[in-house]
Image (cartoon, rainbow, N blue to C red):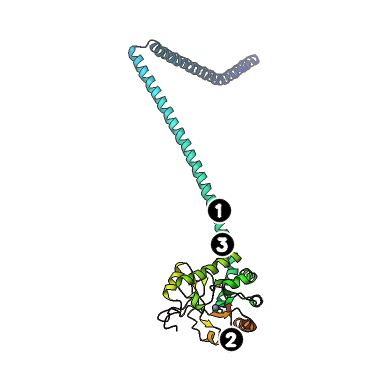
Amino acid sequence: MKKIKVIVFCILAILLVLVMAEKNRILSSDTAPKQMEEDTMTSKHDEVQIEGINNAENTTENKSAENTKEENEDVKPTEENQKEKTAEEKQDEQITKDKQEEKTIEDKQNEKTTENKQDEKVTEEKQEDKTTNDTKQEEKVTEDKAVEKPAETNKSNNATENKKNEKTVYLTFDDGPTASSLEILDILDKYKVKATFFMLEPEMKAFPDAVKRTVKDGHGVGLHGVTHDVSKFYQSPESALKEMQTAQETLLSITGVKTNLIRTPYGSIPYLTDSFRKVLRDNKFILWDWNVDSDDWSASNKNYVQDVIDQLKTLDPSKHAPIILMHDRSGTVAQLPELLNYLQKNNYQTEIIDNELESYSFECHDRCYPHNSSKAQ
Ligand SMILES: [Zn+2]
């Protein structure tokens, strides 16, 4: 019985072992299908790859075949194809040509544009330069003006101030030159004033140095004729003209100065009639008289300066500036400083008479008559 039990046990044990073994086998077969699956997938993948490659190869082959076909077609062109191709080529050529032309045009346009831009740039630069220069010049002018302006303003202020108070006066000396001329010139120089000398032709010849100094000192020079003789000077318009022309030539020869200024002997009233005036005027002579007579030559006039002052005070300031008649003589020299002192203290500014100054002379109206007429007797 015990043996039976042992046998049964053994059988059971064997069974158990078998069961275990079977179990292990089953467990092992669970893993195997996965591997199989994996293997299958791999192979499938490979198949797909192979298929893909085959397909690709086939496609390439097919395409190659097509190409070959096309190539064959190309290789064996029909006339139409040739024509088409020629047309195509022509079209292509035309397109190429057109494109080239377009490119050329474009290039030209670009060049032109570049040129224009360059021109514009140059123009701009020039304009800039010009503008800059103009601006600079303007600035400079402005600066210059700015620099000048204060001086001008001061000058103008001074001039305005002076003009307010200053009065012009013309000093004139007739009948010279004489031995007193240099003394008169010294006094004028000392007072820094200017005068105008109406000179006689023979006296100019007698005192040429005085004539030269008169011009050198910047005084005005005019002509007073030759004879200072009424009957000779006023004998005819031609005689008066001849005397003035002679004096003019002599002054020119001594000093190189040509003057057209004249003062006739004893003034233009009463003997310088209209016919005289016309002849002198036609020969470009400019007649000057006076509006203040110093009467400095008169022996009875002990103080001509006071007489001049009185006349200056009665002159109408709105009319011509004072033209004081004096004579180149020793008696005049003595009181001349007194007159010049008065003029300076009363803000008179001396000016010379020249060829450009508008003349002042007596007008005849009905006051002129010939020196040899019954009226003159
Ligand atoms: Zn005179």
The residue indicated by pointer 1 is 133
Residue 247 image offset from top left, x and y in percent:
55, 69
* Amino acid type, residue under disc 2 in the picture: Tyr
Circle on res. 142: 3
N-terminal of the two: label 3 or label 2?
A: 3
Where is the C terminus found, in terms of image quarters? bottom left
Frontmost residue, 15 versus 79: 79
* Amino acid type, residue under disc 1 in the picture: Asn
Please tell me whether mark 2 sits on a helix, a strand or a loop: helix
Task: Tell me how far mark 2 sits from mark 1, CA to CA.
Answer: 65 Å
Give the number of the mark in front: 2 or 1: 2
Task: Tell me how far mark 3 sits from mark 2, CA to CA.
Answer: 54 Å
Q: Residue at x 33, y 14 (%)?
A: 80
Please tell me whether mark 1 sits on a helix, a strand or a loop: helix
Disc 3 residue crowd, few under 14, some 14–19, many 20+, Cα 10 Å: some
Establish if 359 lies above or below 108.
below
On the image, which quarter does residue 147 sit in?
Answer: bottom right
Frontmost residue, 81 versus 174: 174
